[in-house]
Image (cartoon, grey):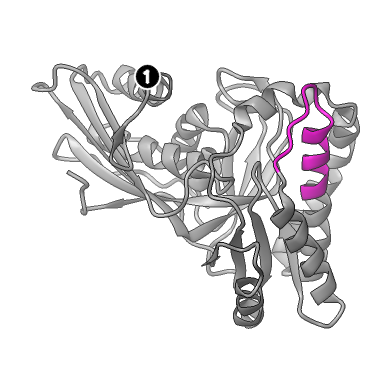
Amino acid sequence: MGKRILRRSKTSKATAVSPANIAFIKYWGKKNSKLNIPFNDSVSMNLDKCLTTTTVEFNPRFRSDKVIVDGKELAEDKKLRVLNIIDLIREKSGVSYGVKVVSKNNFPSDSGIASSASAFSALALAGSVASDLTLSEKELSILARIGSGSASRSIVDGFAWWKKGANNATSFAAQIAPESYWDLRDIVVVVEKMKKKSSTEGHGVALTSPFFKTRQKNLQRRTLGVIGAIKKKNFLKLGELIEQEAIELHVMAMTSNPPIFYWNKGTVEIMNKIRKWREVGLTGFFTMDAGANVHVICLAKDVSKLNSRFKRLPEVLFTISNKPCRGTQLTNKHLF
């Protein structure tokens, strides 16, 4: 897909809406933690019902920078992570005004549904346009990545391939297929709403797992297998590979030093149910990011049946049914 050039804004305020994504091939371990450059490529699909809306305004009347998420001002450490992106935008655009950032999620944050991916991709687009900065899709993916690695993928429409690259200029996401290409569905089965352990912590200790090097040796073949399965719409092959990948990621987390345990009783129960239901012809495949909640990938024809079964399980709090969607987009519906 060609570059998507963002038109210059006539005002200092802009709002973007961006989806979370589910990683079919996971991003785990950083070569460069400051720039979020990973050890391996990753592949994902955008989720149309897990969205972050962010409004950014630069204004000479603002005497200090303010960042509000879901109605609350961010603590200083999280605020600095947001302002790091804002400062990069200021540097590129020449804007020196104070900023106000207001962001809102329509799904549980910090629970393994990639809220940082939707948040920083929305911030990158809204901040760039509010500062009158024109960026290509590649440049926007790079900027979003510095805030959160997985945010690089949410910039792109549909199915994305984040190539690890060798440096800041070569680590970005590109499209594998548009959102309309394949009517896959993702059912987020929520078994825990409490804040999870930070994935940043997991990245930091990833190399301590004895399985890290083995994983790196296997990843290129699996990554190309997942990309090929998407291009050929080979659902069974995709499912086989994403389950292998999800289990491997969590084995690495559990065997790092110190170990990190993201699963709970509900996570294991959902995985077991999925495998059992496949034996009787109801086909779905599980994957998880860094959290207890399970993403079940299925075809559109099986969404209703799977959803009704999940909702009868005592471990399940609720579900969110998603289909592939476009990446980060501008909207005129500002939050302030």
State left or right for residue 21 relative to residue 29.
Answer: left
211 relative to 202 in the view: left or right: right
Which residue matches tag 1?
76
Locate the C terminus by quadrant. Answer: top left
Q: Foreground: 331 or 3?
A: 331
Name the residue at 36% across, 44% down. Answer: 5
When the figure is inspected, residue 266 is found, relative to residue 100, above or below; the finding is below
- Residue at 61% x, 52% y is 22
Residue 120 sits in which quadrant? Answer: top left
- At which x and y percent is residue 126? 31, 39
User: What number of labels is visible?
Assistant: 1
Residue 216 visible somewhere in the drawing:
yes
**Image coordinates for residue 33, horizontal then vertical, percent:** 61, 19
Residue drawn where x is 22% and y is 46% of the image: 335
Residue positioned most to the front: 314
Image side of residue 138 versus residue 134, left or right: right
**Mark 1 packing: few (<14 Cα in 10 Å), some, or many (20+)?**
few
Is 93 colored magenta in this rendering?
A: no
User: Is residue 248 covered in magenta?
Assistant: yes
Q: Nearer the viewer, residue 310 or 210?
A: 310
- Residue 114: percent from left, percent from top: 54, 45
Please state the horizontal and vertical placement of residue 296, each as a whole percent of the image: 67, 64
> Please, is residue 298 above or below residue 164 in the view?
below
Given residues 77 and 194, the one toward you in this image is: 194
SS label for mark 1:
helix
- The region drawn magenta spans 246-262
Whether residue 234 can be seen here: no
Q: The residue under label 1 is which amino acid type?
A: Glu
The answer to whether 199 is drawn above or below residue 103 in the figure is above
